[in-house]
Each structure stands twice: as structure tokens, then as C-alpha cells.
Image (tube, rainbow, N blue to C red):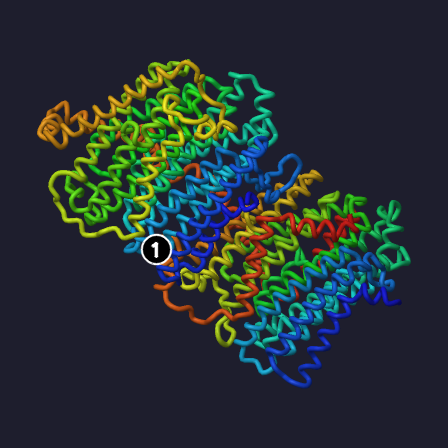
């Protein structure tokens, strides 16, 4: 392992070092602001180090990791997403009456490191290590506030993740038993042709898909999602919904791009069933749901179903569409949970019930506008990043003639629109219904009285940035497309 | 300088964004500074760009077009709509009109709207409107043009219904929106048709390909041009979709001046001029344009004569003046139409703004018969209004309206198709125009003061009035008739536009005809003014007697209602629709959708049962899911 390897792996090393740094800082001087600052700085430095690592890519670092443009792109996405979550979490934790807030950031950085390892993993060992680093941190994060609900969510997550890990490990063991290697490239080399008809190998891949499906929260492995998202602190829900899923998806896509899934009709069929099932189950469950966090949880299930359409497409658009969709999904989900986060009151009571949002536009027009933008993006309305993401997914699917999947996608977009718009309608109606109907802004905003609690600075800044990105990538996609195509051509 | 082109629409959008995000917390002066300033800056940039454009074009005549591709929105196969700005002589003229006239109307609004609630909301909508209008005229791409087209329609709706507490304003807004939607739909279908047959939405590509591929008078160009015309008559309030404009006067007066006189309603004229290649290839549609214009101008100018509400007079007048523009477009006098568009923007904006001062001075009174004597109370308003009125009635030699209308009449006379009859219609229209215009002037400004004017305009209102009055008088010198022209043709507006719009008629040997026609038109205009003087100032008892007679009453009622179009559409469309809706009280068609919603609800409740919150069941589901996945993977191989 030479210096070039170290430079290539620099983002991972720095992310891991940041968590140690936060731990040391806390050991000597316990201060919430300082811990948050060190975390943000660490993430920013890790993000910046991607530029340092880029010239060394693609490069195999030990047998476990491969640092290529694809890995670096998703690491960047993971660090940026974690950065936004950390900003949101700071204001949220300030309001919480907790004795120890600082350890939150250690766990967050560890989880981000695990996620980054997943994005770069080229071996079952690193895959599993990354996954467990991510998961174990998340168990603690989910129940961090220590409330009964949070602990229940954490334990549920722990038990079910353990179950799914068992499936995953068993699948890996079977692959090893059949092929004698755990390296992706080795598997890919042997999996061509003959093995694709081998029932044990196919069963092993299906088991791996089940394990991964749990992390992605796709049907039928989705049931934990609403319970955990509801019980976890809102910023953690944002993290679980985006960074954790995004990293696992990145790995899944890399793995099945190497072991070409299109060689096996039956695997394609299995994933297609999962995709369609996720869309319908996610959207239908969200339909009349009255808890905003649960709505977002179900929405995230449906969105992963959409994403699997791109996953099943062939050709160059497959990776482009997946990457674009994930970026827009990150922005939108973190933004939506971010709104729930900043609206949390003193002592940490979150606004979960949809009725709490009635008339929000009158009292807090900007927050309501941000939330509406996020919901519109989730619904795929033009001029938001979500529209372009969905457009590319559609285009990728159409390019590969996945008509059944596309019809399901279209039907589900229509179903989904209902519950997204339902939230918006509630925000813009209610107590000041008459005044708001005139246009929302203007004098009515002042008449409705001052907001109950100020939006924390960090959270507000994060939301502003996310909204800007949302509109930016929706109106001006070429910049992001350029980066995607530059970074991930290694996989195409 | 030309590189700054993108700033022209971007500045008003930025203003809109700031006002809509922070307007609620802003003090009124701050909102006014942003609202007026953004359009002012945009006007300034337009002037700079215009100067640069003209200089460049003079040095190098081949550079008469400047395009700026900002980015490509989506790229899938042949469908790659670019965010593309296209600047040529035509869009430059439109940009200048929109930003400069728009700026003065914004300035005026800063005072006019001072006592109204929703001050920042007003400026937010106005800025959004200006931005959308600029997108419409600067777009080099039909898709982007359509975005602007819908944007201005939305703003029109929002601003007509600005004082939403009055239900009548809300229904006027809905009427405007629905009626124009009929045209918008036609336009959208036209765009689909063009894209399907040509495979591009870039305006220049569409035009050149159409010219190459299609035959003049063929079915495709005729259909495409007819669909575009459908969009144009909706937006420009021409027959048969003119009914929304008089009701649109429910909006604040600056809105009427900006949207419903100077800019948005002329978008149809712009659209036809922009796609004139297509229209030239469809002679039948072109003739239809001319006939629609002529019919509209007669119908609406007769209606204007009997109105009592000063703003409705101006509304009907606007419809009839746009009728002139359509008449010109229909005979291929493209640049004459644009010339009249420009002068009309000056004098009609001026008239609306003047009317606004009078109305607010009378405490919101719109009825001209309850006004009077404003000349003495407020001479400044009188003189500026008079300038606009003279320009509208085309008073010879000293007004802008004279030159633009004269050019249209001359070009119509020379056109081959039905030249004489269309010209006669135009001439009668000119006569009627000066009657209703000076009826308005005499009723409002002369006679005895019935109510004391309470409010006086300050600088923010009087500067726009003065500037627009100046433009309404001298604005015509950019398009002098041939017998008065000094210097070469290229110094005039039609000469400037000739790089985009082909000149309409031959010039040689026609000077005498032109002189004769202008003289006839002048006499007609003066006769109209005299008639107005006689009936409404010198001997009002005659007009009263005439309108009190039985026949007079019937005619007046007929004209007052705008030839009964509202009644007709009410009988033809609205009440059958309402009847169908009430017959369908239980919503037969909706049953399908309710059924679908019911199915969804059923599945929602069914699936919700699975969310038990019990970990063991969840774990079992994971195991079951794994089993299913394995069986699909293994068994279907």
C-alpha cells in the first residue's frame, strides 16, 4: 500500500478521522456548537479531498476497495447529504433538553464513513463491514433522544436489520461456496454464462437482493420504514431515508453492473416485481396517512421503486438516470424532513400530525413555500429537480422498452400526487383560509402573528441551500449532468 | 452589451422573487423601489442593448440577429428545447415597448396603488408579468414562447382579480382566463402539429423548413396557421373571443394600461408577425385575419360609442385598435401592424393612466356621465389625456396615431384581396374612433364639474403621463408616409423592421394615392370629432332624444352589450354547460374516477392492516419476501 493508495483513499480516511477528532474534542471540552463545527469542518474537508483523490482514480486500494469516479461521486453525495443533516441536527438538538448532545455527531460521522465505504466497496468483506458500520451507528442514532418511541424504533431497526443481515450473509456464503471468491470482479468474471443458470447461485443472488432490499426499504422488506422514521428524530429519519439508502443503492448498482443482471431473465423479473410492488405499496399506504413523517416514509418506499426502473434499464442512461434521480431524491427528502426538523418546538416536540400544518402558509410563508417546493419535487412537477430525475428515469426505461414498469410508474405518479398535494392544500388553507386564497404573501403573513419559535440558523441555511439546489437542478440540469457523466463513465 | 440580453427578462423575475419571498415583511417604499426599480433597470439594459444592436447592424448588415443560448433544458433525441433568446429588429422593438412603457406604468402604480392593500403583492405580480412578457417576445423557441404566453395569462388572471374581496372581480378574472384558454389550447395543438411535422420547435428552423417543405395554400400550413390564429385571437381579444376584455377592466387601472392595452393583448399580433412566413403560405388564413380584424374593429368601436364606464370605452377601443393591427397583418402589412402596436402602446397606456387619475380623483367613479369639468380642476391631466385622445383619433400630422393608422389604411388599399372593402371598413372605424374618443373627452373634461377632484397626482403619476403624452405625439415620426419622408427608408421603423418583416407594398408612383388617402382619413377624423362635439357638448339634447326613442333604446342596448356576444355565448355555451352540470348532479362521469379513488382507498386500508407495528410479523414478512424473491429467481429461470 503506497502513498498513491493513501491519496486515493483520502476521503475515507478523513471521514473516519473526523469522527475520532470529534470524540477527542468532546473528551476535553464538551460544547455542542464546537462539536457541530468540527463535524461540519470534517465533512467539508472530506468532501474537498475528493478533488485530491480524483487524479488517482480509478485505483484499487487493497483488495477491498476500489476508488473510481463512481465511488467518488457517491462519496461526495454522501458527505454533502450528511453535511445538510448535521446542519439541521444542530438546531434540532439545541432545542432538545438532553444532557449529552455531542455524541450524536460521532455517530453521524461513523455512519457517513460506513456509507462511503459501501460506495467504494469491491468485495463482500468491505460490503459487509461498511454496512454494519453504517447500521450500528444508525441503531444508536435512531434511539438517540431516549424517548420511549425512539428506543422502540431503534430496537425494531436493530432486530430487523439483524434478520436481514443474516439473509445477506447467507447469500454471500453461498456465492463463495459456488465460486470460491468474494471479490466483485472475480464473481463477475465467473458469473458469465454458465453460472447464471445455476439455481444455487441465483438463489444466493436473490438472498443478497433481499438483504439489500431491506436497507433500501423496498417491498416486501419495507414494513419497518414508517415505524422507524416516525420514532427516530427527524434529522436521523432524513439520514436513514437518503444517505443510508443512497450508499446501499450505489453498491447494488455497481455490483449488478459488474455481474450483468440482464443475463438472467429471472433476476430481472424479481427486481421488477419488487419495483412495482414498492411503487404501489408505498403510494397506497401514504394515501390517507395523517402523520407527515410516515407519509414521507411511504413516499421514500415508492421512490426507491421508481429508482429500480432506472436500475433495470440498459445502456448509458441507466447510471446517469440513477445518479440524477438519487441526487434529486437526496435534496428533496432531506429538505422535506428538514422542514419537519426546523419546525420542532422547544423540548423537541415534532409537528407530525398533518393537522398541525393547517394554515402554516399564513404564519410562516417561507417554510410553507419550501415544503411545497419539496413536495412538488417528490411529485415530479416541472421546474424542480424531481421532475428532471423522473424524466430521466422514464427516458431510461423507455429506451429499454420496460413498458410494464413505465405504466406502473405513470399510474403511481398520479396516485402519489394526491397525498403530496393534500399536504400542500392543508398548509395553504385553514384558519386564515380567506386571506390566504388571495395570494398567500403580503399583509396576511403579518396579520397571522409571529411564528411560535424561530427557525434555527443552521437549519434555515440548510433549507435555503437545498431549495436553491432543487430549483437550480430543475431549471438548469446541464451542470449536474456534466458532473455525473464525467465522474461515472467508469461504470458505463 | 448584447451579452447582457439575458438580464432583460431576468431582472423583473428577480424582482418578483424578492417581492414574493420578502414582500410581506417589507415597508411600502421598499417594495416600490424593488418593483419599479427592477423594471427600470430592465428598460435601461434594453436601451443599451438596442443601441449596441443598431450600431453593430449598421457596421455589418449581416449581423441583424443576435441569439443567446442560455442552456438546453432537456435533451432526449430530437427533443431538446433550448432556453434560447433571439434578438432581431422585431423582438427588439417589442422589448423596448414592454420595458419602457412597462417602467412608466410601474412608476405610476407606485402612487396609484398606495392606498390599496396588497401593495407588494401587486408589484410582485406586475414584475412576474413583465418577465413573462419578455420571455414571450425574446424567445427563439416556440416552447419557451408558450411558457411566456401562459405566464402572462396567469398574471392577467391574478391581476384582474387583484381586489379579490369583490366577487365580481373574481368572476371577471375567471372569465378572462377561461376565454383565453380556448385560444391557448388551439395554440398548443398548433405547436404539437408543427413539432410532429417538422420535428423542431425552434422558430427559425420551423419557418425555414416549412417554407421548404410545404406548398403555399396546402393543408398543413393552413391548419397550422389557423391554430396559431386561434391562439392569437384569444390573447388579443379579437372576434370571436373578444368578450373577456371589457370585463377585465375590473382590475386596477395600471393593470389595464399595461396588460390589457399596451402589451399582453398585442401578443397575438406579435405571434402572427413572428410566424409571418407560415401565414404567407396560408392565404386563406391570412384573409381570415384581415376579415376578423375588420369585423372586430367595427363591432367594438360601435360598442364603445354607447358605454358609460370610461374604462369600458377604452377597453372596446383597445379591441378595435388591435382589430386594425389584425387588418394590417391580414393584408401582409406586417411592419404597419407593428408600427400601430407601438404607437397604440403609447397612447392607450396614456389614456388608461389618465383615466385612472380621473377615476381615483372622483372617488372611484367610473361613469362618465357623473364626471365633467375635469379640464378646469386638473389642467395637466386634461392636456395629457387630450394628447392621447388626439393620437387615438388620428388627428392629422401632429399625432402618432395618424401616421400608424394612415400606413395601415394605405397598405390595405393597395392589397390585392378585397382591398377596397377592407379599406372602407377601416375608414368607417376611424370615423367611429374619433366619435367615441371625443365623446369621452367632452363628457369627462368639459361641462360642469359634478364632483370635486379630491386627489392630485404627484410626480410619480405625472411624469409617466407627461412622457407618454410626448411619445403619443412624436412617436409617429419613426414611420412617416412616403410623401413626407426625409432621408432614406432605413431610418424609419418599417425600414428597421425590414430585416425581419418583408415590406408590404410597392412604393413607386403611389405618392399621390397616399396623399389622397391620408387627406380622406384626416377629414373623416375631424368630422368625427365635430360630430362628438355636436352631440355631447353643443347640443346634448339631440343625443338624449335619440337614445330615448324606442329604436334608439333597442340599438343602444344592443351596442352597449357589445353586440350581445355575452348573451349569445351564455345561451350557446354557459347555460347548456350549467344545465348539463346540474343534470349530472350525481356526476356520472365522476363515478369512474370515484371508483378508482375507491379502489385506491380500499387497498390503502387493506395494506394498512399490514402495518401492525409488531416486530415478529415484520421479520416474518422479510422471510416471506426472501422466499418469494428466491422462488422467482430460481423457478422462472
Which x, y percent locates residue B242? 34, 31
Q: Quadrant of the N terminus of chain B?
A: top right
Is A247 on the left-hand or right-hand side of B17? right
Above or below: residue B262 compared with residue B524? below
Which is more toward the observer, B108 or A329? B108
Viewport quadrant of the C terminus of chain B: top right
Residue named by callout 1 = B119
Residue drawn at (86%, 54%), measured in percent from left and top?
A185
Instruction: Report the side of A105 relative to B221 (left or right).
Output: right
The residue drawn where x is 34% and y is 24% is B406
Q: Is residue B619 visible?
A: no
Identify the secondary structure beneath mark 1. helix
Callout 1 crowding tier (Cα within 10 Å): few <14, some 14–19, many ≥20? many
Residue A351 appears left or right of B407: right
What is the total number of numbered labels drawn onto the structure image? 1
Position in image of residue A109 (x %, y %): 69, 71
Image height of A341 relative to B441, above or below: below
Which chain is mark 1 on? B
What residue lies at 77% left-to-right and 63% top-to-bottom?
A: A52
Amino acid at each position: 500500500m503506497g502513498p498513491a493508495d493513501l491519496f486515493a483513499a483520502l476521503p475515507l480516511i478523513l471521514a473516519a478521522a473526523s469522527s475520532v477528532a470529534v470524540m477527542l474534542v468532546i473528551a476535553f471540552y464538551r460544547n455542542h456548537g464546537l462539536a457541530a463545527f468540527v463535524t461540519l469542518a470534517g465533512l467539508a474537508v472530506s468532501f474537498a479531498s475528493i478533488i485530491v483523490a480524483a487524479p488517482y482514480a480509478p485505483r484499487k486500494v487493497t483488495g477491498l476497495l476500489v476508488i473510481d469516479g463512481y465511488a467518488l461521486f457517491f462519496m461526495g453525495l454522501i458527505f454533502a447529504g450528511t453535511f445538510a443533516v448535521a446542519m439541521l441536527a444542530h438546531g434540532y438538538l439545541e432545542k432538545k433538553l438532553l444532557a449529552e448532545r455531542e455524541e450524536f455527531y460521532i455517530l453521524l460521522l461513523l455512519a457517513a464513513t460506513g456509507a462511503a465505504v459501501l460506495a467504494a466497496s469491491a468485495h463482500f468483506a468491505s460490503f459487509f463491514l461498511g454496512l454494519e458500520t453504517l447500521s450500528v451507528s444508525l441503531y444508536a442514532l435512531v434511539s438517540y433522544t431516549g424517548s420511549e418511541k425512539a428506543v422502540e424504533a431503534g430496537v425494531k431497526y436493530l432486530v430487523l436489520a439483524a434478520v436481514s443481515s443474516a439473509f445477506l450473509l447467507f447469500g454471500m456464503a453461498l456465492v463463495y461456496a459456488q465460486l470460491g471468491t468474494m471479490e466483485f470482479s472475480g464473481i463477475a468474471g465467473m458469473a458469465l454464462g454458465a453460472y447464471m443458470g445455476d439455481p444455487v447461485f441465483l438463489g444466493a443472488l436473490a438472498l443478497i437482493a433481499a438483504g439489500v432490499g431491506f436497507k433500501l426499504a423496498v417491498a416486501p422488506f419495507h414494513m419497518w420504514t414508517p415505524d422507524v422514521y416516525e420514532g427516530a428524530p427527524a434529522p436521523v429519519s432524513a439520514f436513514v431515508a437518503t444517505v443510508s439508502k443512497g450508499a446501499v443503492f450505489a453498491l447494488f448498482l455497481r455490483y449488478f453492473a459488474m455481474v450483468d443482471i440482464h443475463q438472467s431473465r429471472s433476476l430481472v423479473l424479481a427486481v421488477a416485481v419488487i419495483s412495482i410492488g414498492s411503487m404501489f405499496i408505498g403510494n397506497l399506504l401514504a394515501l390517507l396517512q395523517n402523520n407527515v413523517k410516515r407519509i414521507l416514509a411511504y413516499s421514500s418506499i415508492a421512490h426507491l421503486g421508481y429508482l429500480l426502473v432506472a436500475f433495470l434499464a440498459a445502456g448509458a442512461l441507466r447510471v446517469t438516470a440513477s445518479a440524477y434521480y438519487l441526487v434529486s431524491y437526496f435534496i428533496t427528502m432531506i429538505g422535506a424532513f428538514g422542514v419537519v426538523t426546523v419546525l420542532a418546538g422547544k423540548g423537541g416536540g415534532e409537528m407530525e400530525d398533518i393537522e398541525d400544518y393547517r394554515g402554516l402558509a399564513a404564519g410562516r410563508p417561507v417554510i410553507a413555500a419550501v415544503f411545497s417546493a419539496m413536495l412538488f419535487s417528490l411529485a415530479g412537477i416541472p421546474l424542480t429537480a424531481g421532475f428532471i430525475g423522473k424524466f430521466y428515469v422514464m427516458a431510461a426505461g423507455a429506451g429499454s422498452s420496460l413498458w410494464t414498469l413505465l405504466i406502473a410508474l405513470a399510474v403511481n405518479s398520479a396516485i402519489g400526487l394526491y397525498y403530496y398535494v393534500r399536504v400542500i392544500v392543508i398548509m395553504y388553507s385553514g384558519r386564515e383560509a380567506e386571506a390566504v386564497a388571495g395570494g398567500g404573501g403580503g399583509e396576511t403573513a403579518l396579520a397571522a402573528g409571529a411564528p411560535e419559535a424561530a427557525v434555527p440558523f443552521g437549519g434555515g441555511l440548510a433549507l435555503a441551500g437545498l431549495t436553491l439546489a432543487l430549483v437550480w437542478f430543475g431549471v438548469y440540469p446541464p451542470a449536474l449532468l456534466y458532473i455525473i457523466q464525467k465522474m461515472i463513465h467508469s461504470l458505463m | 452589451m448584447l451579452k447582457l440580453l439575458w438580464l432583460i427578462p431576468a431582472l423583473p423575475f428577480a424582482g418578483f422573487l424578492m417581492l414574493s419571498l420578502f414582500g410581506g415583511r417589507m415597508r411600502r417604499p421598499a417594495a416600490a423601489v424593488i418593483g419599479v426599480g427592477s423594471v427600470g433597470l430592465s428598460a435601461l439594459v434594453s436601451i443599451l442593448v438596442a443601441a449596441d444592436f443598431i450600431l453593430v447592424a449598421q457596421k455589418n448588415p449581416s449581423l441583424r440577429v443576435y441569439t443567446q443560448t442560455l442552456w438546453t433544458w432537456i435533451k432526449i433525441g430530437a427533443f431538446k428545447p433550448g432556453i434560447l433568446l433571439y434578438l432581431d429588429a422585431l423582438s427588439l422593438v417589442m422589448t423596448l415597448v414592454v420595458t419602457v412603457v412597462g417602467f412608466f406604468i410601474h412608476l405610476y402604480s407606485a402612487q396609484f396603488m398606495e392606498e390599496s392593500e396588497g401593495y407588494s403583492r401587486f408589484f410582485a405580480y406586475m414584475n412576474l408579468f413583465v418577465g413573462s412578457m419578455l420571455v414571450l417576445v425574446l424567445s427563439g423557441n416556440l416552447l419557451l414562447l408558450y411558457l411566456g404566453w401562459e405566464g402572462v395569462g396567469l398574471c392577467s388572471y391574478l391581476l384582474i382579480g387583484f381586489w379579490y374581496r369583490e366577487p365580481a372581480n373574481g368572476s371577471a378574472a375567471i372569465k378572462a382566463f377561461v376565454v383565453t384558454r380556448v385560444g391557448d389550447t388551439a395554440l398548443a395543438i398548433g405547436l404539437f402539429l408543427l413539432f410532429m411535422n417538422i420535428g423542431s420547435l425552434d422558430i427559425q428552423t420551423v419557418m425555414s423548413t416549412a417554407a421548404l417543405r410545404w406548398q403555399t395554400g396546402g393543408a398543413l400550413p393552413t391548419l397550422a396557421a389557423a391554430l396559431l390564429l386561434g391562439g392569437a385571437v384569444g390573447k388579443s381579444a379579437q372576434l370571436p373571443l373578444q368578450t373577456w376584455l371589457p370585463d377585465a377592466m375590473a382590475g386596477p387601472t395600471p393593470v389595464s394600461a399595461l396588460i390589457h392595452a399596451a402589451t399582453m393583448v398585442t401578443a397575438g399580433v406579435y405571434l402572427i408577425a413572428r410566424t409571418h412566413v407560415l401565414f404567407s403560405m396560408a392565404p386563406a388564413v391570412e384573409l381570415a385575419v384581415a376579415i376578423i380584424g375588420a369585423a372586430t374593429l367595427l363591432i367594438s368601436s360601435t360598442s364603445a360609442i354607447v358605454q358609460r364606464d370610461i374604462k369600458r370605452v377604452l377597453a372596446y377601443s383597445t379591441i378595435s385598435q388591435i382589430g386594425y393591427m389584425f387588418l394590417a397583418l391580414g393584408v401582409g402589412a406586417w411592419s404597419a401592424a407593428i408600427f400601430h402596436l407601438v404607437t397604440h402602446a403609447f397612447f392607450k397606456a396614456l389614456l388608461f393612466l389618465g383615466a385612472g387619475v380621473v377615476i381615483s380623483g372622483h372617488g372611484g367613479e367610473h361613469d362618465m356621465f357623473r364626471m365633467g369639468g375635469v379640464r378646469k380642476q386638473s389642467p395637466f391631466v386634461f392636456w395629457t389625456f387630450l394628447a392621447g385622445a388626439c393620437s387615438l383619433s388620428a388627428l392629422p400630422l401632429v399625432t402618432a396615431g395618424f401616421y400608424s393608422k394612415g400606413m395601415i389604411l394605405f397598405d390595405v388599399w393597395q392589397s390585392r384581396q378585397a382591398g377596397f372593402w377592407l379599406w372602407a371598413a377601416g375608414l368607417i372605424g376611424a370615423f367611429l374612433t374619433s366619435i367615441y374618443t371625443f365623446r369621452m373627452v367632452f363628457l369627462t373634461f368639459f361641462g360642469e364639474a359634478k364632483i370635486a377632484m379630491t386627489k392630485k397626482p404627484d410626480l410619480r403619476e405625472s411624469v409617466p403621463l407627461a412622457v407618454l403624452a410626448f411619445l403619443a405625439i412624436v412617436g409617429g415620426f419613426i414611420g412617416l408616409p412616403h410623401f413626407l419622408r426625409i432621408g432614406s427608408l432605413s431610418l424609419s421603423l418599417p425600414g428597421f423592421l425590414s430585416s425581419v418583416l418583408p415590406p408590404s407594398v410597392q412604393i413607386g408612383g403611389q405618392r399621390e394615392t397616399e396623399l389622397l388617402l391620408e387627406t380622406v382619413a384626416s377629414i373623416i377624423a375631424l368630422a368625427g370629432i365635430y360630430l362628438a362635439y355636436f352631440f355631447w357638448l353643443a347640443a346634448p339634447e339631440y343625443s338624449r332624444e335619440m337614445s330615448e326613442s324606442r329604436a334608439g333604446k333597442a340599438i343602444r342596448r344592443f351596442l352597449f352589450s357589445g353586440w350581445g356576444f355575452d348573451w349569445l355565448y351564455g345561451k350557446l355555451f354557459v347555460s347548456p354547460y350549467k344545465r348539463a352540470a346540474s343534470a349530472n348532479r350525481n356526476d356520472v362521469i365522476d363515478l369512474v374516477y370515484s371508483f378508482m379513488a375507491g379502489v385506491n382507498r380500499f387497498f390503502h386500508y387493506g395494506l394498512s392492516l399490514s402495518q401492525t407495528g409488531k416486530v415478529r410479523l415484520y421479520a416474518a414478512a422479510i422471510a416471506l419476501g426472501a422466499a418469494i424473491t428466491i422462488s422467482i429467481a430460481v423457478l422462472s429461470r
